[in-house]
């Protein structure tokens, strides 16, 4: 699965797990050769949502005050999308999160797995609007894994029409 800089999701199927890992390795190497900063995460080691938060916080160098919950993940990944992150790495082509064995995390924490993908998709779109690149490659060994839509944005009233009374509602 690929969540690209526009927040677009694509699922790529294959006949074997070995082939999936080969394709993931090829894509990762290609992105690295083009200057992308690649961060690899093994979701197969995440038995709880807290494990995911610890791994993401360490990999993305989130600040000490990171709250280890999905709202805090959204906030901190937003900083990464807008400002390039919390580390002092020079600006490059962009950031790629490569998450392997995501199916294991999705089995143990299905809601969190869905929300994490949604947050990443929204933040990837936000990064693109700022001419930054945030890409996520997600590997699963389960050919039947399914997720709901990710990256959907709500339809909002403009500020002038926001109060119900101002709209005659």
Image (cartoon, rainbow, N blue to C red):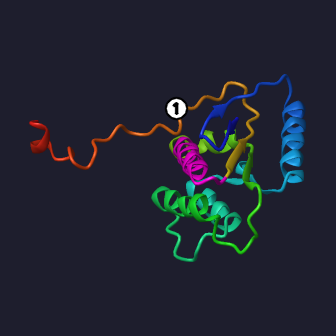
How many labels, in total? 1
In the image, residue 148 lies in the stretch drawn in magenta: no
Determine the residue positioned at 27% across, 41% down.
157
| 46 relative to 168 in the view: left or right | right
| 69 relative to 90 in the view: left or right | left
Question: Within the image, what quadrant is residue 164 found in?
Answer: top left
Residue 74 higher or lower than 18, as above or below: below
Determine the residue positioned at 73% across, 52% down.
96
The N terminus sits in image quarter: top right
| Residue 47 pos. (x, y %) | 64, 52
Range of residues picked out in magenta: 113-132
Which of these two is toward me, 12 or 16?
12
| Residue 72 pos. (x, y %) | 49, 62
The C terminus sits in image quarter: top left
Which of these two is toward me, 83 or 43?
83
| 101 relative to 148 in the view: left or right | right
The residue singled out by tag 1 in the image is: 149
């Amino acid at each position: 699965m690929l969540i690209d800089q526009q927040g677009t999701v694509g699922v790529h199927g294959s006949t074997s797990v070995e082939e999936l890992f080969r394709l993931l390795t090829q894509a990762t190497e290609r992105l690295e050769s083009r200057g992308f900063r690649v961060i690899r995460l093994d979701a197969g080691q995440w038995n709880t949502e807290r494990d995911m938060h610890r791994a993401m916080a360490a990999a993305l160098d989130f600040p000490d005050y990171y709250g280890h919950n999905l709202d805090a993940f959204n906030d901190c990944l937003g900083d990464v999308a807008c400002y390039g992150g919390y580390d002092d790495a020079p600006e490059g082509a962009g950031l790629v999160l490569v998450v392997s064995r995501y199916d294991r995390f999705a089995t143990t924490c299905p809601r969190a797995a869905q929300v994490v993908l949604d947050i990443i998709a929204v933040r990837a779109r936000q990064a693109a609007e700022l001419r930054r690149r945030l890409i996520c490659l997600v590997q699963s060994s389960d050919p039947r894994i399914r997720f709901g839509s990710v990256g959907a944005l709500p339809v909002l009233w403009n500020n002038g029409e926001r109060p119900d009374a101002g709209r005659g509602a």
